Image (spheres, helix red, strand yellow):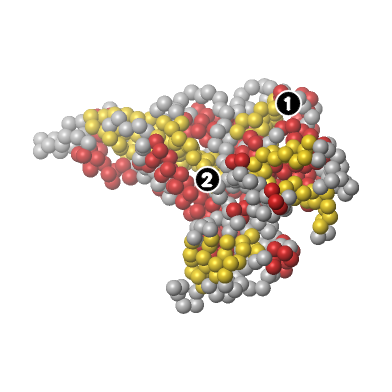
């Protein structure tokens, strides 16, 4: 039974139960139960993505925000927004699959350049004679003598376990040496491992790496649990500043998720977390700051300045990572408030900093970073392309989870679809909505301004808005039709216009034309799955031959692995960050006119 003056909330079909105080919302209940609902707006009631259905019990009357986000039929059927619905007693609710911020497809692979193996931590096996009454040399001095490296210094965790492991291992051990510090002592012959992490706004990717061979032993991904507190970095910064202990909570949630990935990676590889003696973590500036426990208030207001742009090396134990207690976490430098260490890692991984070719690189996501290499210069900008590419702000949008429409083709009056996992369609993800808009434009159902032609088959006006029926209710997995609305088209127009305008501003700053681009590198999870022909058809990229485009997958994750394995590349990352000429789009005179032109679907 729930405690007096508390309400019990049963969350189906997960089967979780949680007791909450009066006045708390269903979103609060889900978060307390460890269930991540999609809360794009950070619980403000404006995105409509945290839909749940009341099964039993009483809730407060629907709020004004809910009456805007949900139709009369949905409200009558018991649908509510979790961030607005407040239990008035014990309740039971159902969470639709599309409202869960979990189980989406994750992009872990990334194309990498070959590198010279020079990890920050190296092994040294030592054997020493045991202590006796005739030899009372202290244990640490005995280690120094056996290593023949008198300048080595021990980390505190090493000293606290030193005497025990020397005797347990018969005085033969392996030292993990980082510069002149011994960060770990392990049984002789133990393989030293490293952890590389791409800390994405929506997804986490982790890699277990053999530091001695450079081989990747395992890879794992998970949704970033911070999604439950805001879909984009702006919402999360606002949450961190608005809520008491908000910043600490966001840091705690992401570390918990990483520890889960560490555990599963080690189990699959037959290794122990104590073997992980170094980590490399990349992310945009906000994710970097939240992970490191740094202040983020200044990132949310002009002029959007990071607390630190230099590379950091933080003891892993201070961050709460369950790896070897002497391990360090390396974070590469940031470039600006919205261009972070993940973009630096991508530039390093793709070799953008090395040759003199004229190349463009984009890491496409909620926040898209763009860099142009030309004549020895590196110019970068960041554009708020919005979460539409993640399926957010789309009427029937969802993440790339099973049942999400990822490919659309119109052949005459027939709509052909491909879904993630080949499951019955329940919504549409980013690559699917991009395909849909491109196909609707190609078929003449949309004009270049993004307006529907009402006389065309499949187009209708409902509840004051014009939409195209992509999947009728009878064919949909959830029994609810899937549509593309005029507002959805506008979201894609805004997103692609921001990217195209950013590209054009960089080209103008460098004094080159798009035709001079020898290669366009498209990175990121969305960049991996988008159909380049669809992107070109609606004008997201300059009109170049497909042969000049290269989709490289999770290049930031690849860069994190390279930076884990090479101290030389860590220096290169610093040089890249210093070389970059950051262009602030919000104050650039060309951005607005370029953006307006790029809104056209052409």
- The residue beneath circle 1 is 546
Q: Pick the quarter of the image with the N terminus.
A: bottom left
Residue 498 lies left or right of residue 7; in this view the side is: right
Q: Is residue 192 above or below residue 488?
A: above
Residue 291, how many percent across, how many down? 52, 49
On the image, which quarter does residue 214 sit in?
top left
Local secondary structure at mark 2: strand
Local secondary structure at mark 1: helix
Residue 187, how many percent across, how many down? 28, 35
- Report the number of discs: 2
- The residue beneath circle 2 is 222
* Residue appearing at x 66%, y 27% in the figure: 550
Q: Is residue 262 above or below residue 579?
A: below
- Observer-nearest residue: 29 or 301? 29
* Residue appearing at x 46%, y 25% in the figure: 117
Q: Can residue 570 be seen?
A: no
Q: Is residue 135 above or below residue 69?
A: above
- Observer-nearest residue: 343 or 32? 32
Residue 340, how many percent across, how many down? 60, 41
Q: Is residue 58 above or below residue 291?
A: below
Query: Which residue of the protein is positioned furthest toward the left in this rendering?
Result: 133
Residue 42 lies left or right of residue 457; in this view the side is: left
Q: Pick the quarter of the image with the C terminus.
A: top right
Query: Which residue of the protein is positioned furthest toward the top in this rendering?
Result: 356
- Observer-nearest residue: 125 or 109? 109
């Amino acid at each position: 039974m729930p405690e007096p003056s508390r309400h019990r909330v049963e969350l189906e079909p997960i089967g979780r139960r949680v007791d909450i105080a009066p006045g708390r919302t269903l979103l609060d209940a889900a978060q307390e139960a460890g269930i991540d609902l999609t809360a794009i707006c950070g619980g403000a009631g404006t995105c409509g993505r945290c839909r749940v259905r009341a099964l039993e019990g009483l809730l407060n009357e629907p709020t004004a925000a809910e009456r805007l986000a949900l139709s009369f039929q949905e409200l009558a059927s018991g649908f509510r927004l979790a961030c607005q619905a407040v239990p008035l007693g014990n309740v039971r609710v159902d969470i639709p699959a599309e409202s869960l911020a979990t189980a989406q497809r994750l992009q872990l692979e990334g194309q990498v350049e070959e590198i010279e193996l020079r990890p920050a931590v190296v092994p040294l096996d030592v054997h020493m004679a045991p202590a006796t009454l005739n030899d009372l040399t202290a244990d640490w001095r005995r280690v120094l003598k056996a290593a023949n490296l008198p300048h080595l210094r021990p980390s505190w965790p090493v000293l606290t376990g030193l005497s025990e492991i020397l005797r347990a291992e018969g005085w033969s051990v392996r030292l993990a040496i980082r510069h002149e510090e011994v960060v770990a002592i392990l049984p002789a012959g133990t393989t030293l491992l490293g952890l590389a992490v791409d800390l994405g706004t929506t997804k986490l990717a982790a890699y277990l790496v053999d530091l001695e061979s450079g081989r990747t032993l395992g890879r794992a991904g998970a949704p970033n649990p911070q999604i439950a507190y805001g879909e984009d970095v702006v919402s999360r910064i606002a949450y961190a500043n608005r809520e008491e202990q908000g910043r600490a909570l966001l840091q705690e949630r992401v570390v918990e998720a990483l520890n889960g990935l560490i555990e599963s990676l080690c189990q699959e590889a037959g290794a122990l977390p104590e073997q992980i003696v170094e980590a490399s973590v990349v992310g945009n500036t906000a994710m970097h700051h939240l992970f490191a426990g740094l202040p983020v208030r200044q990132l949310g207001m002009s002029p959007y300045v990071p607390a630190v742009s230099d590379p950091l090396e933080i003891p892993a134990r201070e961050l709460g990572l369950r790896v070897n207690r002497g391990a360090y976490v390396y974070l590469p430098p940031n470039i600006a408030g919205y261009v972070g260490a993940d973009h630096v890692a991508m530039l390093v991984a793709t070799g953008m900093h090395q040759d003199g070719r004229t190349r463009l690189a984009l890491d496409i996501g909620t926040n898209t970073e763009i860099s142009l290499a030309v004549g020895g210069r590196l110019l970068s900008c960041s554009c708020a392309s919005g979460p539409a590419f993640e399926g957010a702000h789309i009427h029937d949008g969802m993440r790339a989870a099973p049942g999400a429409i990822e490919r659309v083709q119109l052949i005459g009056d027939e709509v052909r679809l491909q879904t993630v996992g080949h499951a019955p369609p329940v919504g549409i993800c980013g690559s699917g909505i991009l395909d849909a808009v491109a196909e609707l434009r190609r078929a003449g159902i949309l004009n270049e301004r993004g307006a529907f032609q009402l006389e065309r088959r499949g187009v209708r006006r409902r509840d004051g808005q014009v939409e195209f029926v992509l999947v009728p209710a009878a064919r949909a997995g959830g029994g609810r039709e899937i549509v593309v609305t005029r507002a959805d088209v506008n979201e894609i127009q805004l997103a692609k216009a921001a990217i195209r305008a950013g590209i054009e501003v960089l080209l103008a700053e460098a004094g080159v034309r798009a035709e001079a681009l020898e290669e366009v590198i498209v990175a990121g999870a969305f960049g991996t799955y988008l159909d380049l022909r669809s992107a070109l058809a609606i004008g997201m990229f300059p009109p170049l031959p497909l042969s000049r485009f290269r989709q490289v997958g999770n290049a930031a994750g690849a860069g994190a692995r390279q930076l884990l394995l090479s101290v030389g590349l860590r220096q290169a990352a610093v040089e890249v960050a210093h070389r970059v000429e950051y262009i602030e789009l919000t104050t650039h005179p060309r951005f607005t006119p370029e953006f307006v032109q790029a809104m056209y679907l052409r």
